[in-house]
Image (spheres, rainbow, N blue to C red):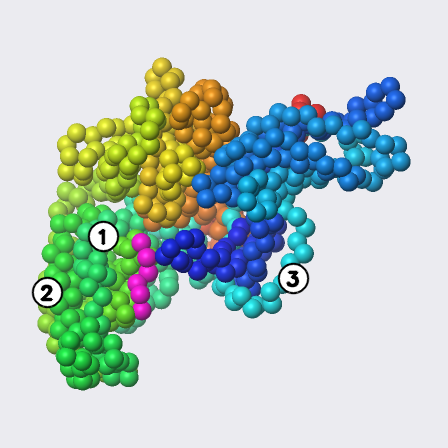
Amino acid sequence: MGFHNLSFYMLDEDTIGHDDVIGKVSLSKEYISSHPRGIDSWINLSRVDPNEEVQGEISLELQVLKEAHRQVLCCHIIEARDLAPRDISGTSDPFARVLWNGQVLETAIIKKTRFPHWDEMLEFVLEEETIAGAPIAVEVWDWDMVGKNDFLGRVEFSLDALQKAPLKGWFRLLPFPSTEEDAGGKLGALRLRVRLAEDRILPSRYYQPLIDLLVESILCPPEEKDDVTPLAMLEEVCSVESRQDVATKLVKIFLGQGLVVPFLDYLNLHEVSRTTDPNTLFRSNSLASKSMEQFMKVVGMPYLHEVLKLIINRIFEEKKYVELDPCKIEPSRTRRISFKGSLSEAQIRDSSLEVLKGYLRDIIEAIVGSMQKCPPVLRMAFKQLHRRVEDHFPEAENQDAKYIAISGFLFLRFFAPAILTPKLFNLRDQHADTQTSRTLLLLAKAVQSIGNLGLQLGHGKEQWMEPLHPFILSSIGRVKDFLDRLIDVDTENETSENQSWTPFHPSATVKEGYLHKRKAEGLHLVSRFTFKKRYFWLSNETLSYSRSPEWQVRTSIPVQRICAVERVDENAFQQSHMMQITTRDNGGQLSTMYIQCKNVNELNQWLSAIRKATISNECMLPFCHPGAFRSNRWTCCLQADRMVRGCSRTHSAVTLGDWSDPLDPDTEAQMVYKQLLFLREKLREKCLEFTSKETTLDEGRGAQKDNKGQWMSAAARLLEVIQDLEQAHKAFEHQEEEEAAAASTAHS
């Protein structure tokens, strides 16, 4: 929450040695905050000035002491933390330098640490004629035996202020004032979309009225189809741009309530009932279509991985040249296909056709054979959708509508996008290269055509796809049969809806995979043999691991015992992408397990996932050691006392909005509230419109209504909930301000 800058670095990857930095874009928190709707633009890269690449804080005590015949400026240089690593080892050799009025004093050099402890007193005798106006600067440098020292940051103070009152505390290290001129776009530009969202999540009881209001629309559906419920009102005032966010939050809220199938059925019924042409069904970005799409991503990702991962990996590994479009065929690239030289266009098309049909055959086989792998809650939602479409379009000429409604979501909005961009669905760690990407595009087009039951074949501009049409048409019957079996769900599942959303049970796995672990206790030597490959599972209840996924014996750590989840400096084990998990046993004893991930993205995902699971733990530590205790000292701060307090602050930052997030009803409800707050004026207009209609109707009937016992309009009830939540937020904000003021007074 307290970050100051967000920087993006563009690098040139080198196989040998360090990657070269091309340039960077740096955005201050103030600049990002000044764009509440977000930044979306091309921004020129600027040169990277080493004197600007600073981080960390320094602990100082500064005061002016008056002696008999002179004044002395006393600078107590205590320690620093989280300094930038400047050496290959991932550390620095820091020393502090104090500058005043042309005089310079320096501390000792502390070798190989980003958390130096100096505890040195540096003194200047102040001369009367030079006291006024001369600032005091404290700088931190990395000492180098060869070449010039590296700048690590500085902080500046006014001597006039020090003479009035001493200063003591932690101060953020700042860069030298920049003298670098803008590169003027010579280094290129980076397209960025950045938005800062900071929210205060209130205790659960404050969101319950909002959740109850939304759930009421499902549990107590309106007697007349034209009656307005709070949920229908939310859909009506919600903008097209925000529907995807709102849909994701609503899906998670109703999953948490065990009512996701009735919720989707409610939206789908509204969507179907107002559609006259089955060919346009769910083609718009309505709340119903967005909710179904997000619902599949939230509950169906493990299913998607089981169906597609093996074939996607094979496509990436084989890297076959595939092309059907005669305008894009490059004969020179086909030498990989034939050692006899370049093939003709006809040979390339024939070869490509066979490769595509082979891949498609495996994809369709995997899909139509996946009925038992599909989550029951997903099958129930499709069954309800099938029923609604069949009832609304019973005509013989519309018999395919009930199939297209399901396949439109399952094939066009789930399988096909995952084939097109596997990285976005966590099927691959990296995006495909150009050649593989073209293969995936052609396969995605074919899968879309199959999902459309071949209705669009021959009507598009891409006539060169025609050689695949026979295969596509031959697959349609199998797909229909698969959909019939998919929605053939037992009535037992229908009556036990609360048990059907198993992906979000507290004991359900949130994240899993192979990692390398090492306990802090035991061997002092560091070697690759001290790290053991283990398969980890994380749920909201336990973090467990074993030798392999099939291994029966697991070691489990209760999540409630975890009190810190932090990164580890590279110099601790001479290994990158490391994190540590600190736990407390029943006797209060702390123990640490070190874990290595295969890359920085996996490290961030595990950090975020475990922090989410421990977000309610009351035993979390405020400080930790980002190093390890080896050779009788901490590698980070070089302290010899194993039990000394951590030299770095712990963190709780998590990545929000991931499809695999565990349910957090308070966060979801807060996001819905923020959307409603943004739409408050629209709701007020609807409320007035509704009230005027009711008044006119009552006058026509000559009836007198008692408002106390009557059902209020949806807009008015939503406005009431918004107002209550707004007041609660203001009360918490006022309380925080009072606590901060009290802490400041106590400190001074």
Residue at 64% across, 31% down: 107
Is 690 situated above or below 707? below
Magenta region includes residue 248: no
The amino acid type, in three-letter code, at marker 2 is Arg
Q: Quadrant of the C terminus?
A: top right
Taking depth in this image into account, of 552 and 176 the one nearest to the observer is 176
Crowd tier of the residue under label 1, counting other residues whose Cα lies within 10 Å: few below 14, some 14–19, many 20 or above: some
Image location of residue 69, percent across then percent down: 88, 22
Distance Cα–Cα, label 1 vs label 3? 49 Å
Image location of residue 454, percent across then percent down: 18, 74
Instruction: Give the residues drawn in magenta, as a range.
Output: 429-434
Q: Is residue 700 visible?
A: no
The amino acid type, in three-letter code, at marker 1 is His
Label disc, if present, on residue 181 of the rendered structure: 3
Q: Nearer the viewer, mark 2 or mark 3?
A: 3
Image location of residue 598, percent across then percent down: 31, 45
